[in-house]
Amino acid sequence: MSVEFSFLLVQALSGLASASSLFIIASGLTLVFGVTRIVNFAHGSFYMLGAYVAVTIVPWLLQIERSPTLFFVGVLISACVVGVLGVLMEILLLRRIYKVPELFQLLATFGVVLMVQDAVLHIWGPVDIAGPRAPGLRHGVMILDQRFPAYELFLICAGPVVLGLLWLLMHKTRFGVLLRAATRDRDMVGALGVNQALLFTGTLFLGAFLAGLGGALQIPRVSASAQMDLSIITEAFVVTVIGGMGSIGGAFLAALLIGQLQAFGVLIFPKITLVLVFLLMALVLVVKPWGLLGRPEAAPVSAMPEGIASPRRFRAFEKLLLVLALLVAAMLPLFGDAYAVKVATEVLIFALAAFSLNFLVGNGGIVSFGHAAYFGLGAYASGLLVTKLGMPMEPALIAAPLAGGFFAALFGFFIVRLQGIYLAMLTLAFAQIAYAVCFQWVEVTGGDNGIVGVWPAPWVASRIAYHYLVLVVAVLGIFALRHVIYAPFGASLRAARDSAARAEAIGIDVRAHRWLGFTIAGAAAGLAGGLYAFSKGSIDPTLLGIPLSVDFLAMILLGGMQSVMGPVLGAAAFHSIKDVFMPLTDHWRFFLGASIIALVLIFPRGLGGAYASLRARFAGGAP
């Protein structure tokens, strides 16, 4: 046998080991979504907790006797502990949001992510913790003159074993039959008298158990770290979506594809390894919108709460409040310090970005989990023109909305063909593609170091002058989007949001309207990104990352999607809280996560919605 063949065989086995591990983790996410329809962003946190609990329990057990039996007993105990934590999350949080739109579910579970991150840092500290090697599996096995770790061979077997056990559970037990029935039609299962609360609780235990098992099995390979959750959740989502939401067999097939793609992609395409899996996800969703083995959703969950009325124009009192707010923003540099001006400038920028997202979600019913991509691409367009081509600020800033709009049009052409959770996942896939390109194209973008020296023109070089530029541009951008909302095009978007079939019946080209709306929102986000680049003087790939997209979602939730100007208020409140109050405590992640969860549970209509309810109550009408 040639050396090349033996090397390729070992590389394929490494891909199988990674695929097996990824399947164990993703199978739990697939089960949870299939039964509950919850977009559980906290699944990565359960994976991380499984690793941390295992590096605590397993070494203690191995002190008794260093045997493979005690090692795997510790792994199973760790997975059970995580399963119980999943039950606690289901009882305390998820039961209250099963019927809410997927946007609220994502935000609530992301709040759990932040709280768990803070708890992990408090309990185990910020230093990575290495786990023990598995007794009896520390050696290497010679395969065609190539040494391959025995533990990797064990992992290759673990995935099919878990698949077989899940098949037996799903087909040979009453609980499994109910799970399969709920995956296809959970309302019918409830109508037949099945205790849905107990079924959902059992599903969350099983899903969290599998995530914890996947994390615990990783401790001989990787150290437990506080960054494990976000690093794995995107891959788990990719597996779940490619395979088909709710399909265990699809998840196994998708994990195999991704494992081999990663194993050989690093050899064939070393500079775009991060892009490959998301390209595969985008390709599958474009060709097969419900995944490889998934089924179309009979009634996709709406992106918006029911009963959202058409936008209402400002009353006299509200116009007065708006004028006062603009006066405060204009007068702030005269009586505020440099830090206050900096925060106010960023609030205006994020208000424009949040408003552009609400233009999609609130007015168009298009849930985007990756809106920060267009914000970041606008920032990179301005930054690269200034630093690489030596252009002045003015044309570089004009290029920001053009870049955001161009990529929104390119991605949106495929995105608007889908609906429901698959549409939202495709927005995430394209956003991660953009993020990966900026992260790995080091020669142009600087990689994770980013780009520095993105300074504004001399006439707005002072922080005060730049604040006024941002104030003018952001206000004009927001009012231009608001004008579109009240125009016939905005009304057509709302018609498509409320009932695509009825909109098509009266002659509205729903797909074309959504595509154009997606492009307009991307251009506005790109403009905000360009403003942000010149405000900070530097850019990096985090401007396209998932956390910033979630921040934008939190802003529109805090302000209220039902209100046209609510996102502006939400951006002001959210960014001010995050930038001013959160740094005052080391546990800011915990408090931010708790605040997001409280918004979803207690204050779901946001500040704008609460104001509308109070106004209606005092006026004697319905909220």
Image: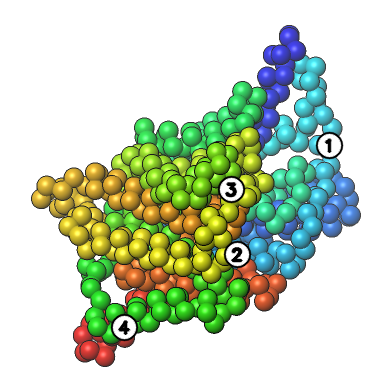
Point out the frontmost of discs 2 and 3.
Answer: 3
Left or right placement of residue 335 versus residue 354 in this view: right
Disc number for residue 367: none
Q: CA distance from mark 1 to mark 2?
A: 35 Å
Residue type, label 2: Leu
Residue 534 x %, y %: 54, 56
Q: CA distance from mark 2 to mark 3?
A: 20 Å
- Judged from the image, the secondary structure of the residue bearing numbered disc 1 is loop
Q: Disc 3, disc 4: CB below 8 Å?
A: no
Mark 3, residues whose alpha carbon is within 10 Å: few (<14), some, or many (≥20)?
A: many
- Judged from the image, the secondary structure of the residue bearing numbered disc 4 is helix
- Mark 1 or mark 3, earlier in chain: 1
- Mark 3 or mark 4, earlier in chain: 4
Q: Name the residue beneath numbered marker 4.
A: 320
Q: Name the residue beneath numbered marker 3.
A: 541
Residue type, label 1: Arg
Q: Name the residue beneath numbered marker 1.
A: 138
Residue 244 x %, y %: 43, 41
The N terminus appears in which quarter of the rendering? top right
Residue 262 x %, y %: 61, 32
Q: Disc 1, disc 3: CB below 8 Å?
A: no
- Mark 1 or mark 4, earlier in chain: 1
Q: CA distance from mark 1 to mark 3?
A: 38 Å
Q: Is residue 48 above or below residue 344?
A: above
Point out the frontmost of discs 1 and 2.
Answer: 2
Residue type, label 3: Pro
Report the front residue among 367 and 575. Answer: 575
Residue type, label 4: Leu
- Judged from the image, the secondary structure of the residue bearing numbered disc 2 is helix
- Judged from the image, the secondary structure of the residue bearing numbered disc 3 is helix
Q: Disc 2, disc 4: CB below 8 Å?
A: no
Image quarter for residue 293? top left
